[in-house]
Image (cartoon, rainbow, N blue to C red):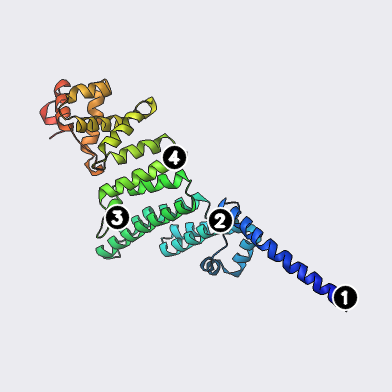
Amino acid sequence: MLPLRKILIVMVALLVAGAVRAPLELAMTKELRDSRLLPEPLDLDAREKIGQTGFAVALGGLRTLVATFYNLRAYTAFTEDRWMDAEESFETTVALAPSTTYYWVNGAWHLAYNAGHSYQNDSSLPPLRRQELWRSTVIKGRKFLERGIRNNPDSWTLNAELGLLLSDANKMPAFTGPGGSTPPELYQAAADAYHAASEHGGPAHTRRNRFYNLARVPGREAEALALGEKLAESRTNRTPTVLSLLFVLRMHANPAQDGYSLSRTLFNDDRHAYRALSFLWEDRRQNFPVDGLALVLKALEEHLAIPPEKSILR
């Protein structure tokens, strides 16, 4: 009986030790996953996609290797215009390596841009079907980026890519369809995305792009003007677009001021001012504000002796 008693004591001791260790190990695992030092377990859908062999390899700590394989598989599908296969491979890739921002950027780009362009130019499809497929893939690209940001909230790259997509004049019709967003709402969302990008270490252009988008949101002109004035304190940010938007926002704030004098203050040179402000006037698809532009362009043409037949206002 003595050996049996010893065995029972050992078994009880092991059960007690396991009961004590389990909560500690679970807490440690959660902390490691929250700190992105340990990957999340693969969900059932991802396991089914990669098969038993791939799952065994991933379980053995080689998930990055399997993700690389599926990323290459997605690229092959892209070169052959097999967009459903490409999308499935991208989904598997990010399921295996959700912390690798490159995979999210790459997948979103192929969906929103390459797949969309391919469907738009597929003459074998009826026009309405082409348009619907284009719209759906652009929306998928946006959702893919937004999921990437939820998995990597500190990534300036993913936030900047989202801002770029939302403010792209060629892609906006996909988001402004029935039940969709208005252009000002998209510009506001793009400004927010660029703000997040700059807050997480993005380069100077992310702050300028936030300004460009905020300037296009009706009702946010004062905030945009304050941001633009702050940007213009640095010589590197005094780009033609920044200065042009500063002009129209200052004119919006004070329409009675002399536009020509303001252009001289900002640009110092009539020809430079005329060139920069003309781009803003001509590129109307970008929905930039144009307060005071027509009058100042007319004044600049007079000072530069530009004949009426060559006027930008014609």
On the question of residue 167 being in view, the answer is: no
> Mark 4 to mark 2: distance in Å?
30 Å
> Mark 1 to mark 2: distance in Å?
54 Å
Q: Which residue is mark 2?
A: 68
Q: Earlier in the sequence, mark 4 or mark 1?
A: 1
Residue 60, how many percent across, how many down?
66, 61
Nearer to us of marks 4 and 1 is: 1
> Mark 3 to mark 4: distance in Å?
26 Å
On the question of residue 299 being in view, the answer is: yes
> Mark 1 to mark 3: distance in Å?
74 Å
Q: Secondary structure at mark 2?
A: helix
Q: Which mark is residue 3?
A: 1
Q: Quadrant of the C terminus?
A: top left
In the displayed structure, 56 sits above or below 277; it is below
The answer to whether residue 72 is left or right of residue 197 is right
Q: Which residue is mark 4?
A: 199
Look at the numbered discs 1 and 2 and tell me whether their residues touch, using CB distance below 8 Å: no
Amino acid on which disc 2 is placed:
Thr
Q: Secondary structure at mark 4?
A: helix
Q: Earlier in the sequence, mark 2 or mark 3?
A: 2
Q: Quadrant of the N terminus?
A: bottom right
> Mark 2 to mark 3: distance in Å?
31 Å
Nearer to us of marks 4 and 2 is: 4
In the displayed structure, 41 sits above or below 260; it is below
Q: Residue at x 38, y 42 (%)?
A: 194
Q: Earlier in the sequence, mark 1 or mark 3?
A: 1
